[in-house]
Image: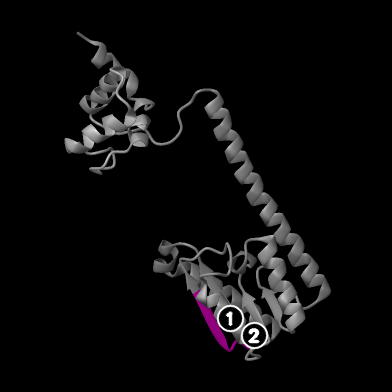
Amino acid sequence: MVIYLRVSTSEQAASGLGIEAQRATAVAYAERKGLVVIDEFTDEGISAKNLNGRPGALSALAAVRSRQAEGILVAKMDRLSRSVVDGAGLMESARREGWALHFADLDIDTSTPAGEMAANIIISGSQYERRLISQRTRDALAAKRARGERLGAPVRLPAIVVERILRERQQGNTFQSIADGLTADGVPTSRGNRKWFPSTVRAVTVSKHVGEAGALSAAP
């Protein structure tokens, strides 16, 4: 076997804890099943959305396809794939090309019909759960918009800058002209940038600071 390890964030890669935990799980599985590990491939700080851009995964596949190894062993299924399409494609490649996929956390060997079926069911369930979470998030945001709630982080600007933007907007100036004036005057945005855009100006006009600054601008 060759072991494949992956962590998705730079923080996990720097700590090494995620990699070590996966390695320990995979090695324990190999010992329990009497499998011989000949090599190890790692992708650090890389997502599992697809195989593109994952040199470690591609190297593991090259090892089994060149017959250097008889299979790929991963600690967790989602370390190798997080989608039904990719997961099913890998299992079909393994079946067609004569190598095995082992998922240590599930104790599954996809070289058997039962193992392949179980892996497909679990991958489908995982993708279904992720899509449900995504849909719930979209529905919640849509409900907030419908109630008129403002979304995103509030704009952090001095009241005098917000007042200027509101005053110029009330005078009929466009978002573009206001942005150009702020840029020309060297006024920094809430993120410290020197370049203003119409969308940036518009965001200020709908920020939570508008009520306070609006009252200031309306004062005599």
Query: Which circle marks residue 189 in the picture?
Result: none
Quarter of the figure that contains the N terminus: bottom right
Tell me which residue sits at (30%, 17%) in the image.
170
Q: Position of residue 32 (x, y in %)?
A: 68, 81
Spot occupied by residue 105 in the image (x, y as percentages of width and height): 65, 68
Is 192 situated above or below 66? Answer: above
The residue that appears at 44% across and 64% down in the rendered structure is 12
Q: Residue at x 64, y 79 (%)?
A: 72
Q: Is residue 56 left or right of residue 77?
A: left
- Residue pointed to by mark 1: 60
Residue position marked by numbered label 2 in the rendering = 64
Q: Amino acid at mark 2?
A: Val
Q: Is residue 41 magenta?
A: yes
Q: Are marks 1 and 2 in contact (CB under 8 Å)?
A: yes
| Quadrant location, the C terminus | top left
Secondary structure under the numbered disc 2 in the rendered image: helix
Judged left or right of residue 185, residue 59 is right
Q: Is residue 100 visible?
A: yes
